[in-house]
Amino acid sequence: MKGLIIAALGLSLLTNLQPASAQQVAVKEQITLLHGSHRVGKRSDAAMEKWRGYGLGQFIHWGLYAIPGGAWNGKQYNGAAEWIRSWNGIPKSTYDSLNYSFNPTAFDAKAWAKTARQMGAKYVTFTTKHHDGFCLWPSKYTKYTVKNSPYKKDIVKAVVDAYDQEGIDVILYFSVMDWNHPDWRYDLKTKEDSIAFERFKKFTRNQLIELLTNYPTVKGLWFDGTWDKSWVKQAAFADELETEMRKLRPGLIIGSRFRADENGKRHFDSNGVLMGDYEQGWERKIPAKIEDVHGNDWDCVMTVPENQWGYNAAWNGHIKTGNELIEMTARCVSMGGNFVLNFGPKGDGSIRQEEIKLATEIGDWMKINQEAIYNCEYAGYEKQDWGYFTKKSGTDKIYMVVFNVPVSAALRIKTPPKTIIKKAYLLADTQEVFSPEEISGDEYFLHLKKREQSKPFVIVLETAKAEKGNGTKYEKAKI
């Protein structure tokens, strides 16, 4: 019944928003789903409103894979460091025995949290268990946990407590795929596979309820390892489990990759409606334009090198600079998303100095310009080559986040119709004001006094709606 109601609601909303020709297509393509999305449109509750306004976050990938650090016996693994167990260059049993060597004496959750706060992160996503199955909390459902390592102490609790203390919200990463568990299957091809996977589903449910029970302040769950056929086929079970978790923790935030619908569709169900609370499809990539996010909430998770999440001693390829990462943050916020930067601590628990330096550079910029990032959204202004527009949610205040100063030192602005620029000034120095030069209807130049800038900067536009237009209108050319 729930599926029928949601399908009807989605159809009603879609047809009301579309022109007649599109309505006919929408009507024809809508199908009834029992395990598709159970909501059309964005969540509007306080928890999701807060998530939407984060702007900048931190991701931490940490586990046993940090010990080999992307190499084994002098040979470099060319894949992502956290996937090294899947490499034939290291025996599986040898990797699984790394828990007996896991003793991160330099781990300091409070220092991690202070680094995140200094950077300006409003939330952190932390790996409780990656694909290798090693749990950084003392789960009572497996022996493959930190409790049975030389370290013994609950790392997840330390992280949650430290970040809570710094006022940074915590999201828990959880990999459904578990290479260590004997009942995990990539596909279910035999009766024996199905029987084993039933045990695995119970195990997975128990661990997730355990995490939500043990750490009651966490704000959400970030799922990984959900693409294999075995899990994709569990639409009914995963749907029921999601309902159970949301009932246990009202306001819980879950991304789009947790489950599939009954037709195997992930992220978006068979009717094209987002599954979960926000789109998780932007991994190490950013939308090209606002239309690409389809009006949904979303975030981008990004690595510093090309594809290294867990610690890799050899950072190969291009290493992103502080200015690049600041630009990615502004670009994401300008299209209504959050930007989440990954850190991969070493096996001893320390964060590499290169990452701390980047966090410091970003944080120094955020201290001055954070107003243009936190609680901001898509502004509705036409994108210009100099940078990005953001808009303070619930206001008419617009921010120009400038990265590329033209040789003319003139920044072009094209406002939406009937928009007045009441005031323009530098965010870092409100005494430095600009007088917009109108160059055509709804189009202006702001002339900079300085041509050379070593860091991106922000100009604030205080705007208002005009009843009869912006003022001067120019006659269009006649053909």
Image (cartoon, rainbow, N blue to C red):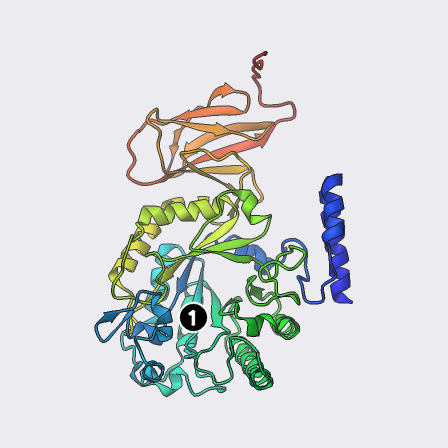
Quadrant including the C terminus: top right
Residue 322 appears left or right of 209: left
Across and down, in percent, residue 374 comes to: 47, 49
Tell me what residue is drawn at x 27 percent, y 77 percent.
105
| Number of dots carrying numbers | 1
Tell me what residue is drawn at x 76 percent, y 40 percent.
20
Q: Which residue is mark 1?
A: 127
The residue furthest front is: 189
Tell me what residue is drawn at x 72 percent, y 63 percent.
33
Quadrant including the N terminus: bottom right
Across and down, in percent, residue 387 comes to: 41, 37
User: Regarding mark 1 in the picture, which secondary structure is present there?
Assistant: strand
Across and down, in percent, residue 29 comes to: 72, 53
Across and down, in percent, residue 90 comes to: 31, 77
Residue 265 appears left or right of 214: right
**In this orientation, which residue lies closer to the viewer: 310 or 350?**
310
Residue 164 appears left or right of 90: right
Is residue 367 visible in this depiction of the protein?
no
**In this orientation, which residue lies closer to the viewer: 195 or 355?**
195
The residue furthest top is: 478
Query: Would you identify the image quadrant in which residue 71 lies?
Result: bottom left
What amino acid type should be assigned to the residue bearing mark 1? Thr
